[in-house]
């Protein structure tokens, strides 16, 4: 028998344990019913279940589900389109999602899979700051794909990049410029 504070009360009959629990206006709960003798604890069972449900809810709330985001390209992609895909890929990696980069080969492009592999390696090199290559480029039918996983930066609690610190003198100078423009605009009206 265990008290509500965790103190051992020793071995006693069920009737005695029930009487103590009723006197304290608490419940008698079997913790280990299969042991000899069974272990019981005096506690507020409703409060215990509420706290357990609250803990489970907290764990679920703080859980981040990692999604796999996919970016598709062709081997003949233009430089600006490549940069747009790269920018989106970096955004996905910063948010903590895995990234699947896929190149689709059509027709005669299948003869030049080396171009697609170079493109994927270039993409991986550009993303090296925020992600690691999980699976190297692999040809699967008409598609060549590669997986990237986000890097975990030590000591960084938030995933948002911090804004660069500015000196107090800079802020005042900018404020003066704004005020000066406002006064000029006011004078013209």
Image (tube, grey):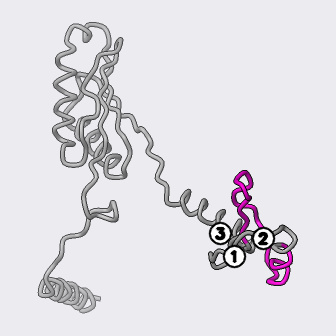
99 lies above or below 10: above
CA gap between label 1 and label 3 equals 25 Å
In the rendering, which numbered label is found on residue 51?
Answer: 3
Tag 1–tag 2 contact (CB < 8 Å): yes
Q: Which residues are magenta?
A: 18-41
In the rendering, which numbered label is found on residue 9?
Answer: 1
Kind of element beneath mark 1? loop
Q: Quadrant of residue 120?
A: top left
Direction from residue 126 to residue 30 in the image, left or right: right
**Does label 1 or label 3 sit earlier along the sequence?**
1
User: How would you rate the neighbour count of disc 2 (Cα within 10 Å): few for under 14, some for 14-19, many for 20 or more?
Assistant: few
- Of 37 and 165, which appears nearest the observer? 37
Q: The N terminus is located in which quarter?
A: bottom right
What residue sits 17% from the left and 19% below the top? 115
Direction from residue 50 to residue 92 in the image, left or right: left
Direction from residue 46 to residue 146 in the image, left or right: left
**Does label 3 or label 2 sit earlier along the sequence?**
2
In the rendering, which numbered label is found on residue 12?
Answer: 2
User: How would you rate the neighbour count of disc 1 (Cα within 10 Å): few for under 14, some for 14-19, many for 20 or more?
Assistant: few
């Amino acid at each position: 028998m265990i008290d509500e504070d965790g103190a051992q009360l020793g071995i006693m009959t069920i009737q005695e344990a029930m009487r103590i629990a009723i006197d304290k206006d608490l419940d008698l709960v079997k913790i280990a019913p299969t042991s000899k003798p069974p272990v019981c604890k005096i506690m507020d069972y409703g409060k215990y279940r509420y706290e357990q449900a609250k803990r489970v809810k907290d764990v679920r709330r703080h859980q981040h589900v990692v999604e796999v985001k996919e970016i598709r390209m062709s081997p003949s992609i233009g430089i600006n389109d490549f940069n747009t895909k790269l920018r989106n890929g970096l955004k996905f990696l910063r948010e903590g999602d895995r990234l699947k980069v896929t190149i689709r080969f059509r027709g005669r492009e299948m003869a030049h899979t080396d171009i697609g592999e170079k493109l994927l390696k270039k993409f991986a090199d550009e993303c090296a700051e925020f992600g690691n290559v999980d699976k190297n480029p692999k040809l699967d039918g008409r598609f060549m794909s590669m997986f990237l996983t986000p890097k975990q930066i030590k000591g960084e609690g938030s995933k948002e990049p911090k804004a660069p610190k500015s000196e107090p003198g800079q802020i005042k100078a900018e404020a003066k410029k704004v005020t000066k423009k406002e006064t000029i605009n006011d004078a013209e009206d």
